[in-house]
Amino acid sequence: RSVYDDQPNAHQRFMEKLDACIRNHDREIEKMCNFHHQGFVDAITELLKVRADAEKLKVQVTDTNRRLQDAGKEVVAQTEEIIRCRVQQRNITTVVEKLQLCLPVLEMYSKLKEQMNVKRYYSALKTMEQLENLYLPRVSQYRFCQIMIENLPKLREEIKEISMSDLKDFLESIRKHSDKIGETAMKQAQQQKTFSTTLQKQNNVNYGRNMHLGKSRIWESKNEITLKRTFEEEDEHEEEVLTAQDLVDFSPVYRCLHIYSVLGDGEIFENYYRKQRRKQARLVLQPQSSMHETVEGYRRYFSQIVGFFVVEDHILHVTQGLVTRTYTDELWNMALSKIIAVLRTHSSYCSDPDLVLELKNLIVVFADTLQGYGFPVNRLFDLLFEIRDQYNETLLKKWSGLFRDIFEADNYSPIPVANEEEYKIVISKFPFQDPELDKQCFPKKLPMSQSVPQIYIQVKEFIYASLKFSESLHRSSTEIDDMLRKSTNLLLTRTLSSCLQNLIKKPHIGLTELVQIIINTTHLEQACKYLEDFITNITSISQVTVHTARLYGLSTFKDARHGAEGEIYTKLNQKIDEFIQIADYDWTMSESDGRASGYLMDLINFLRSTFQVFTHLPGKVAQTACMSACQHLSTSLMQMLLDTELKQISMGAIQQFNLDVIQCELFASSEPVPGFQGDTLQLAFIDLRQLLDLFMVWDWSTYLADYGQSTSKYLRVNPSTALTLLEKMKDTSKKNNIFAQFRKNDRDKQKLIETVVKQLRSLVNGMSQHT
């Protein structure tokens, strides 16, 4: 062992001891040989025998000795190597001790790197905190620790940048999915509303069970089935509909918030988040230019807004301080003002009432959805009242076209009914009652034309359409009832009235059509009370409720009748003018034809047949039309005599003219329209009659003597009129055969005419001076 331990002179001592050991063994061998001589001899003998082997053994021993000597040299070398290893072992022990201090640091740093790689940034920050506070101070004297200490702030910045990048991706994700989130939330709100409505109906049925026990069991079973189906449908929808958490991963915002909070920059993060969300809010609130063209444009707009605020509400409830109620309220108020402005602008472009109605339904769902998340939406319902007015305007435009089409397609003749079935079909569309007509046998005719039931049906359709908009506005039945009445009033007083007035003014509408229009408006006026009952029924308002608005159909149809009556008077006068224009008098004839002019007889026949059609009109209207026609005819005939282009008139022409006036008077006296008292209608021609009598009798002395007296025979003859006509008969040229005859046969009469002319001029001048 001393040799292995490399002690001084150990090898020499080893060799000496080895030699002593050999000698001792030799002595023992000798003793043994002596003691065992025979055995020794035998052994020698044997030894001799194996001498040859001994030689070989000697060679082997010599070789072994040589090799042993060589091996000794190797032992020495290895011993030196062992010494060096022992030094290294001590160094290694020291290194192990130091590594035991450094390994936890390295492991933590490796763990930090692994956490960074798997994006567990919040855990990585906790690991950094442990490194800085617990592990690195133990080995701070080493250079690698200084490098770690220098890298930790960089890693923190890297984590902030990565988390901020994740946040930006999150913001981009919710921007892309906001419409889907909003659509989901609006569907859920609509399903909840449907569920509540169904449940309310079920409760109403159960409430009525005590009053109608027998029937209620049937209704209850039916409603339970309906309610069950509704619940099943709701469950199916709930399985299909995804939530906001399903559509968007909110972990980046939570992670980023925690990271910035740990790093002490929570306020910076909050400000950045709110700033970016405000920018997104402005983008979401900016509509597409063509949004008003389709309902899908509005639906996407509302879905994006709902999605935005659903996300904010979710962030509000799952984070601490990132989003506050004050912040969301401020953001909502800003958004609400923008939404209202956008809807006002774009809804004004909508000319389709169906689109406006769908827009209203979207706004209601939109408002109900956000109201469910705690946002105030009263201003949206106020906006709906503005849109309701616009909806009514679009309805009025649409119904104006419907009314025009109905009037264009009408034949303006009474409705023929061939049997009881056809009669029931008509009265099922229009509330018509006439006991006298009911007594008549089929076939028969209803007094109104086909447009009346069609107009009545369209008015009811308008009320239904208007009611659709009034639903879901969170208003009482009384308010809805009043809104419907006001809308219907606009339809009657503006749209229908305008269509009637335009119809009346159309050139192709003749007297027969005008008469039918008056009859139609009379029946429509009578039907207004049924429209009021109809509105009351569909709004479930009590009959005793005091309405703030009543239907003004009575005045509408009265105005239309007055317009039609005025148009009848005008068209009658125009027709009379057409006959007058074809009058072809020979104003220089010496004698009359002895019969009335053809044009006048045609005119009287036309008036007679026309007034027969007026039998269905109210008596006063027919009388007024007849009186107006006679007065206009009288005036036209008078203007014909006094026409400035007519320079001379013969006595024969006066006589012919008198025959025509006589026919007019006979027509007036024949009572073409019943109801006139005495000769009231004949008085329309009194001016013409007195003027013609004056010239036919040539009773100027009486006229001049009685002028100005109430008992005068020619009280209605104006001096200027008589003067004008007399001057046309005066001899102003040699071609005047009548006055030529006067000059030949009776010059005194010519002087009388000149005297009368002077006196008439004096009367005319006196009248003008008095005036």
Image (cartoon, helix red, strand yellow):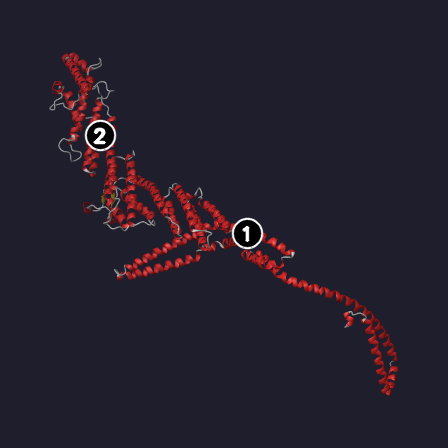
Residue 116: quarter of image: bottom right
Badge 1 crowding class, 10 Å Cα cut-off, few under 14, some 14 to 19, many 20 or more, is some
Q: Is residue 46 above or below residue 184?
A: below
Q: Who comes first in sequence, dot 2 or dot 1?
A: 1
Q: State which quarter of the image contains the N terminus.
A: bottom right
Q: Secondary structure at mark 2?
A: helix
The reply to whether residue 110 is visible in this rendering is no
Considering every residue shown, the one lying at the far front of the view is: 8
Residue 341: quarter of image: top left
Disc 1 designates what residue?
160
The percent position of residue 240, horizontal first and vertical second, equals 44, 57
**Label 2 is placed on what type of residue?**
Leu
The reply to whether residue 766 is visible in this rendering is yes
Q: Secondary structure at mark 1?
A: helix
Q: Nearer the viewer, residue 265 or 422?
A: 265
Q: Nearer the viewer, residue 317 or 248?
A: 317
> What residue lies at 35% left-to-right and 45% top-to-bottom?
382
Q: Which mark is residue 603?
A: 2
The percent position of residue 572, horizontal first and vertical second, equals 23, 32
The percent position of residue 171, horizontal first and vertical second, equals 49, 50
The percent position of residue 651, horizontal first and vertical second, equals 18, 19
Q: Nearer the viewer, residue 280 or 663?
A: 280
Q: Nearer the viewer, mark 2 or mark 1?
A: 1
Question: Is 539 situated left or right of 168 in this image?
Answer: left
Badge 2 crowding class, 10 Å Cα cut-off, few under 14, some 14 to 19, many 20 or more, is some
